[in-house]
Image (cartoon, rainbow, N blue to C red):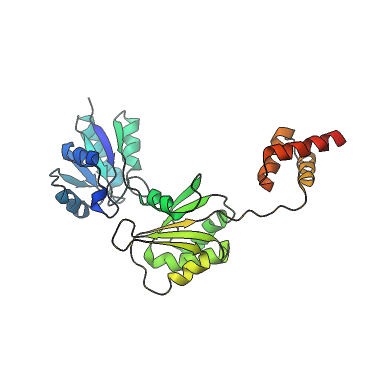
């Protein structure tokens, strides 16, 4: 029988955030695949974990995945960790997980810290739905194209950004999404100098322009403000009815969403319109 691959979340800063289960799993597996073995060794030493480490990062991911899969198929159980947080979330690992699943090797999540989830939980922005885009493009042209895609996004947009690119990213956000766009920036989460900024894009640009920015960053762009549609509800119902082949039920749903109104209210308006016709 093949072994199991454990995808183990590790602290993003505060070592006390390591779970009991994560410590036990890392002690029991035959090998730990780590993004940076020198960095991870400090964590293992803190918890007296003696398990051997092997490097697994973006530059050797393809070849190393095959080596690790072979050991798993021979019956060894292995663990995958990243430098901080949950592996495979904007970090190496999905190729190994994909190969294991295709080969019938069991993959087990050992959940724990995630900078993305931690930032969302304290930002005060809507989280019933959100869009995660990983790291913003390093070059302004690519970054601006991406920002234009979610300029009108009606859900929170989450991304990671590096300290030396933050001011350039904020300038692009101000220009494309507007100076008044609400956002939050979480810096150095769970660490001594943890900071959460919440305000407008213009306020964020001013705040982070005064001193050199340091630490890990999660940038959360709040939903775009709902723009009031032109005309009345009845105008919109008539337009959708004349210009599309949608049913009245579908039209009511679309118009309710467009105006931010209860479906029952728009439905009554549609009944009056249909009676008139």
Q: Is residue 34 left or right of residue 232?
A: left
Q: In the image, is residue 266 above or below residue 151? A: above
Q: Assign the C terminus to one quadrant of the image.
A: top right
Name which quarter of the figure residue 238 lies in: top right
Residue 190 or 140: which is nearer the viewer? 190
Image coords of residue 38 (percent x, y): 19, 54
- State the residue at coordinates (18%, 40%): 31
Residue 211, picture quadrant: bottom left
Point 79% across, 46% down: residue: 235
Total count of labels: 0
Q: Is residue 207 above or below residue 268?
A: below
Residue extending farthest to the right is: 276
Q: Which residue is situated farthest in the bottom direction here?
A: 210
Task: Examine the image and state in which quarter residue 233 appears.
Answer: top right
Q: How far across and how far down the image is residue 198, in percent?
A: 46, 61
The residue under the point 35% across, 31% down is: 102
- Which quadrant of the figure contains the N terminus? top left
The residue at the point 48 percent across, 65 percent down is 170
User: Where residue 174 sits in the image (x, y, percent)?
Assistant: 54, 66
Instruction: Say if 21 sits above or below 145 in the image.
Output: above
Residue 73 coordinates in the image, percent (x, y): 23, 30
Residue 10 in sight in this render:
yes
Q: Nearer the viewer, residue 194 or 201?
A: 194
**Residue 277 visible within the image:** no
């Amino acid at each position: 029988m093949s072994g199991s691959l454990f995808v183990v979340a590790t602290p993003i800063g505060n070592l006390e955030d390591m779970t009991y289960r994560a410590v036990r799993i890392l002690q029991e597996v035959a090998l730990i695949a780590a993004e940076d073995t020198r960095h991870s060794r400090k964590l293992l030493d803190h918890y007296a974990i003696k398990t051997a480490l092997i490097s697994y990062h973006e530059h050797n991911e393809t070849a190393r995945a095959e080596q690790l899969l072979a050991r798993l198929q021979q019956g060894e159980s292995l663990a995958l960790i990243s430098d901080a947080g949950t592996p495979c979330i904007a970090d190496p690992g999905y190729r190994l997980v994909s190969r294991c699943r295709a080969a019938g090797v069991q993959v087990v999540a050992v959940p724990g810290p995630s900078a993305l989830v931690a930032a969302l939980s304290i930002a005060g922005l809507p989280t019933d739905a959100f869009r995660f885009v990983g790291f913003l493009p390093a070059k302004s042209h690519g970054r601006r194209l991406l920002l234009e895609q979610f300029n009108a996004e009606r859900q929170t947009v989450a991304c990671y950004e590096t300290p030396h690119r933050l001011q350039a990213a904020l300038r692009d956000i101000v220009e494309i999404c507007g100076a008044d766009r609400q956002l939050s920036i979480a810096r150095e989460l769970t660490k001594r100098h943890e900071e959460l900024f919440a305000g407008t894009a213009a306020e964020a640009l001013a705040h982070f322009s005064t001193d050199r920015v340091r630490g890990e960053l999660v940038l959360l762009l709040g939903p775009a403000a709902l723009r009031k549609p032109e005309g009345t509800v009845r105008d919109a119902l008539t337009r959708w009815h004349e210009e599309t082949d949608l049913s009245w039920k579908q039209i009511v749903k679309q118009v309710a969403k467009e105006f931010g109104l209860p479906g029952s209210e728009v439905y009554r308006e549609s009944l009056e319109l249909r009676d008139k016709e």
